[in-house]
Amino acid sequence: MNTDEHLEEFYQSVTHLHDSADELSCAGKTIVLFRVALECGAVGLGMIGVLHLISRLFTAALGIMHGEDEPVFAEILEEFETDNKTPH
């Protein structure tokens, strides 16, 4: 299960890797990060699930740009972790 601490550590690791890739353009790094998100996300969520998650994040980002309150990304994460649990 994800914890805030683990998510923050992963975020910091990815950010450090991104910042240290000076030879790549911003667009190039963005494409690589998006590709990794699609490929790795599809393994656990399926392609439809990962696209739904990306859509939710995209909608949240547009809301922030429009001046709405920042979404609680933990709530989006919780929704997807709950929806994708295998029933026993």
Image (tube, rainbow, N blue to C red):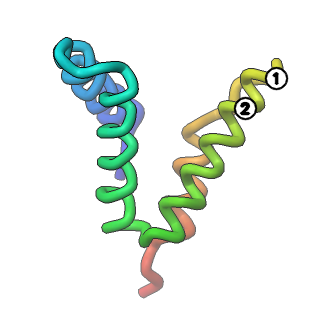
Q: Position of residue 14 (x, y in %)?
A: 26, 28
Q: Is disc 1 placed on a helix, strand or loop?
A: loop
User: Label 1: few (<14), some or many (≥20) within 10 Å?
Assistant: few
Q: How many marks?
A: 2
Q: Residue at x 38, y 31 (%)?
A: 30
- Picture quadrant where residue 61 is located: top right
Quadrant in the picture for the C terminus: bottom left
Towards the viewer: 39 or 27: 27
Q: Is residue 28 above or below residue 35?
A: above
Q: Residue at x 73, y 24 (%)?
A: 64
Towards the viewer: 46 or 25: 25
Apparent side of residue 58 relative to residue 45 in the rendered image (left or right): right
Residue that lies at the very extreme toward the bottom in this rendered image: 88
- Picture quadrant where residue 38 is located: bottom left
Residue type marked 2: Leu
Tell me whether circle 1 and circle 2 mark residues in contact (CB < 8 Å).
yes
Apparent side of residue 43 relative to residue 87 in the rendered image (left or right): left
User: Label 2: few (<14), some or many (≥20) within 10 Å?
Assistant: few
Q: Is residue 42 above or below residue 9?
A: below
Apparent side of residue 58 relative to residue 18 in the rendered image (left or right): right
Q: Position of residue 18 (x, y in %)?
A: 26, 22
Q: Residue at x 54, y 64 (%)?
A: 82
Q: Is disc 2 placed on a helix, strand or loop?
A: helix
Q: Position of residue 66 (x, y in %)?
A: 82, 23
Residue, disc 2: 62
Residue, disc 1: 66
Q: How far is disc 1 from disc 2 in space, using C-alphas?
A: 6 Å
